[in-house]
Image: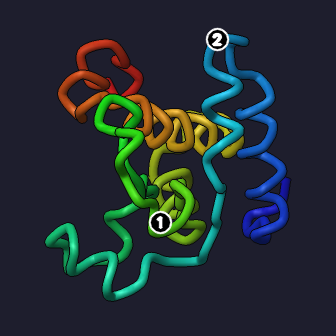
Amino acid sequence: MTDSPDIAAFYTMAESARAGLPEAFAPAAAQVVLRIEDRPSEAMLAAIGLDDPMLLTGLYDGIPLTEKSVFDVPEGPDVIWLFRAPILAEWRARGNVSLSTLVAHVYVHELAHHFGWSDDDIAEIDRWWE
């Protein structure tokens, strides 16, 4: 893979991660829209209190399944955002993981938020960052 895969390559890697999910998670994952952008928008950064767009590799935008109600009026579909430039920067800095593995990890982390897991819940189960 080249040093700077394009957005289409990121979609391919993320969709491969989605296809590899355990069967129990696949139906819910299929309901979440996948979006890939070079960087997060200023509005996204402001909403979560970040200034540096390179610190955000992914974002879940939606209502977690644990909080959804039949009375909710959705404003749009739940979305997992993956941000190409920050992921590439982290991949280069790490140097010990394949890009497809990192993309899959960020995707699964954001999908875990869709299932209602907090960052602390994810960190307790996923020791990948160590």
Q: Mark 2 points at which residue?
A: 24
Crowd around label 1: few <14 · some 14–19 · many ≥20 (10 Å): many
Residue type, numbered disc 1: Pro
Most extreme residue toward the bottom is: 42
Foreground residue among 49 and 9? 49
Instruction: Say left or right for 39 vs 125.
Output: right
Which quarter of the figure is the C terminus placed in?
top left
Q: Where is residue 40 in the image (x, y as percent from the top left)?
A: 44, 76
Q: What element carries label 1?
A: helix
Left or right of 22 on screen, residue 117 = left
Q: Residue at x 45, y 60 (%)?
A: 74
Is 115 drawn above or below residue 88 in the view shown?
above
Separation of disc 1 and disc 2 at Cα? 30 Å
Front-most of residues 4 and 6:
6
Q: Which mark is residue 39?
A: none
Asked which quadrant contains residue 23, the reply is: top right
Where is residue 63? Give x, y as percent.
Answer: 37, 48
Nearer the viewer's eye, disc 1 or disc 2? Answer: 2
Q: Name the residue under label 1.
A: 86
Per the image, label 2 sits on a secondary structure element best described as loop
* Residue placed furthest toward the front: 71
Determine the residue positioned at 55% across, 71% down.
85
Residue 43: percent from left, percent from top: 31, 85
